[in-house]
């Protein structure tokens, strides 16, 4: 099983930036997909971004609107989420997910991932 540890969350003003990191250890597969989801208070967990290194493709939720970038360093078994121009509605707990496998033509779902981190809080103030 893959162990995931997120870091980089915090409090930022609207319009600011944060960079999240997710370090993977244990059984890791470089060809497997990794991604980020988030959950706001009182809402369901939702997809944010994901990547499939094997196919060289990335996926983003519509609300990202070009503000976030997912990247991956296979040598470090780490995936990143750079978030710029943050909005108050981006507030929530951000979860890293690994061991993902899904139809490359589709947007991944939470059920497509086998391992999850504990989450890191992102709070965007107005």
Image (cartoon, rainbow, N blue to C red):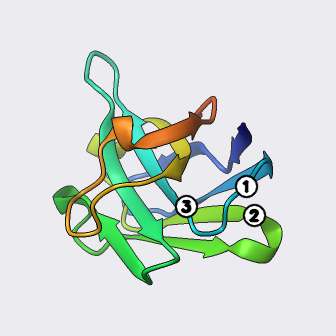
Question: In the picture, residue 56 is in which quadrant?
Answer: bottom left
Helix, strand or loop at label 2? It is loop
Identify the residue under disc 1. 28
| Coordinates of residue 94 in the picture (x, y in percent) | 49, 40
Which residue lies under the disc numbered 2? 77
Task: Name above or below for residue 87 compared with residue 32.
Answer: above
Packing grade of label 1 (10 A; few <14, some 14-19, many >=20) is some
Q: Helix or strand or loop: what does disc 1 sit on?
A: loop
Residue in the image at 77% along x and 48% along y: 27
Q: Is residue 118 left or right of residue 49?
A: right
Whether residue 102 is visible:
yes
Foreground: disc 2 or disc 1: 1
**Could you tell whether 98 is left or right of 59 in the image?**
right
Labelled pair 2, 1 in contact (Cβ < 8 Å): yes
Q: Badges 3 and 1: C-beta atoms under 8 Å apart?
A: yes
- Residue 55, label in figure: none
Q: Quadrant of the C terminus?
A: top left
Residue highlighted by disc 3: 32
Disc 2 to disc 3: CB gap under 8 Å: no
Q: Can you say which quadrant of the picture contains the N terminus?
A: top right
Q: Residue at x 60, y 64 (%)?
A: 80
């Amino acid at each position: 099983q893959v162990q995931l540890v997120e870091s980089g969350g915090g409090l930022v003003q609207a319009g600011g930036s944060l960079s999240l990191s997710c370090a993977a250890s244990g059984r890791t597969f470089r060809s497997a997909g990794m991604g980020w989801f988030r959950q706001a208070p009182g809402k369901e967990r939702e997809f944010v971004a994901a990547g499939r290194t094997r196919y060289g493709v990335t996926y983003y939720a519509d609300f990202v609107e070009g503000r976030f970038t997912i990247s991956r360093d296979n040598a470090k078994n780490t995936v990143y989420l750079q978030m710029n121009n943050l909005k108050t509605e981006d507030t929530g707990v951000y979860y890293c997910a690994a061991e993902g496998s899904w139809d490359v033509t589709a947007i991944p779902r939470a059920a497509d991932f086998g391992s999850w981190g504990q989450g890191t809080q992102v709070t965007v103030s107005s």
